[in-house]
Amino acid sequence: YETNLIKALQQADYIVSVLPSTKETKGLLTLETFRKSCASRPKHSPSPVLLNVGRGDVIPSAQTLVEALDRGYLEAAILDVFQQEPLPPDNLLWTQQHPRVTISPHVSGVTQAKDVPNLLLENYDRYVNQQPLLHVVDWDKGY
């Protein structure tokens, strides 16, 4: 696998961002990152499609996305998360109605109601028995 972001993106048909919001990930996918990732693609190779279901601030702005699409650095963008939620009515992603942007209402990580009681009971048992809990948020890491 590839650990260099630009090299990894150069090989990608799809960019699926599930990143948390941390100081290392905020603004990570810049216009320059998208430009560099397309620089060595074969001339008629399609650009990658971006799916962002992690955190919205991994992309610096709506303008970054629109420019990346218009310059051909991205083929399309499918977005479930945004820097500001709900996405304001005057946001460029609404007002421009870019034909290659799909917006979903932050539902990619839906919790199923049927799963909650079992997890709650499991963690309660672990807590009572002084065992590590499942799915604990590490506030120092930010996720």
Image (spheres, grey):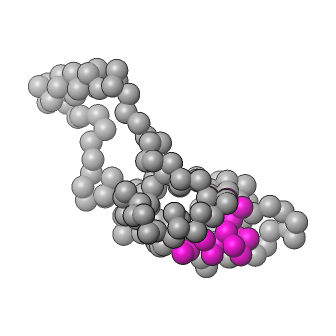
> Residue drawn 58% across and 68% down?
96
Q: Position of residue 24 (x, y in %)?
A: 41, 68
In this rendering, is residue 14 above or below 6?
A: above
Q: Position of residue 78 (x, y in %)?
A: 59, 53
Q: Is residue 25 visible?
A: no
> Residue drawn 68% across and 65% down?
74
Q: Position of residue 86 (x, y in %)?
A: 37, 57
> Residue drawn 68% across and 76% down?
35
103 within the magenta span: no
In this rendering, is residue 131 above or below 55?
A: above
Residue 75's quadrant in the figure?
bottom right
Along the horizontal axis of the image, is 125 left or right of 42? Answer: left
From the viewer's side, name the closer residue of 48 and 85. 85
68 within the magenta span: yes
> Residue drawn 71% across and 75% down?
71
Residue sitting at the far right: 44
From the viewer's side, name the closer residue of 125 and 25. 25
Which residues, given as a range, are shown in magenta? 62-77
Number of marks in picture:
0
Q: Is residue 50 visible?
A: yes
Along the horizontal axis of the image, is 34 left or right of 52? Answer: right
Quarter containing the N terminus: bottom right
Residue sitting at the far bottom: 32
Q: Position of residue 21 (x, y in %)?
A: 38, 61
From the viewer's side, name the closer residue of 22 and 7. 22
In this rendering, is residue 52 above or below 135?
A: below
